Image (cartoon, helix red, strand yellow):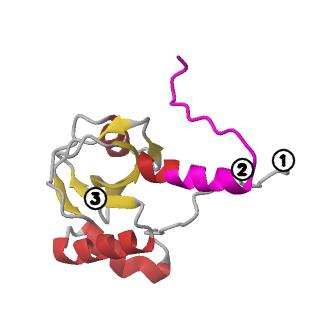
Amino acid sequence: MPKNQTFFQWPRTVSLSSRQKNRPLVSYVRNFDLEKVKNILVDAAKVDPDLMFTLDNAQGDQLVRSNDEDLVNVAQREFFKQAMNGNEAYVSDVIVTLTNNELIVVIATPVRDMNNNIIGVLQANVYLDQLSDFVTELQKTVQMYIFFQGKELY
């Protein structure tokens, strides 16, 4: 495979980066403007309905979600701990959701204030049933075998 070529890419990408054009979005998240953040997360989920987004405070309380499921505390979850410790793009192992017992992988990143202090976590949940559907469709067009493996070897 040529250098810098992506081997596997999720079919859609949602960006909530801190680039110049997104500064108002970042400001809403940093200031925990929950009404505006809810709208941002809902809009992001419309772009990629296979994802669910959540903003968590520093205590692990989910403050707002892109869907209407119950808000829970995720402080005990490894993805939350990693993001709160400064891991900029932590991807969890497969875990079970606290709200509906579905299998997911979580992508988590810290939310920082203007002084670069970590004040919360922005998480994106990838539901594995959606990924499974994508792989099934992909295998209809390309003959291949795909294996999923966590961080630990068993």
List x then y, in percent, for residue 3. Answer: 82, 50
* Element on which disc 3 rests: strand
Extent of the magenta region:
133-154
Is disc 1 in contact with disc 2, using a CB cutoff of under 8 Å? yes
List x then y, in percent, for residue 21. Answer: 47, 83
Q: Is residue 128 above or below residue 15?
A: above
Residue named by callout 3: 54
Is disc 1 in contact with disc 3, using a CB cutoff of under 8 Å? no
Q: Is residue 67 above or below residue 21?
A: above
- Tell how many labels: 3
* Element on which disc 2 rests: loop
Dot 2: few (<14), some (14–19), or many (≥20) neighbours within 10 Å? few
List x then y, in percent, for residue 120. Answer: 26, 53
Amino acid marked by disc 2: Phe
Q: Residue furthest top?
A: 154
Observer-nearest residue: 147 or 138? 138
Real-space Cα separation, disc 1 to disc 2, in angstroms: 8 Å
Q: Is residue 23 left or right of residue 36?
A: right
Residue 20 inside the magenta-drawn segment:
no
* Element on which disc 1 rests: loop
Q: Could you tell me which residue is drawn at 51 percent across and 53 percent down?
A: 133
Q: Disc 1 or 2, which lies upstream in sequence?
A: 1
Q: Could you tell me which residue is drawn at 18 percent across and 57 percent down?
A: 69
Residue 52 bears which disc, if any?
none
Residue 7 bears which disc, if any?
2
Image quadrant assignment for residue 124: bottom left
Observer-nearest residue: 150 or 74? 150
Residue named by callout 1: 1
Q: Disc 1 or 3, which lies upstream in sequence?
A: 1
Q: Disc 3 or 2, which lies upstream in sequence?
A: 2
Q: Could you tell me which residue is drawn at 64 percent across and 39 percent down?
A: 146
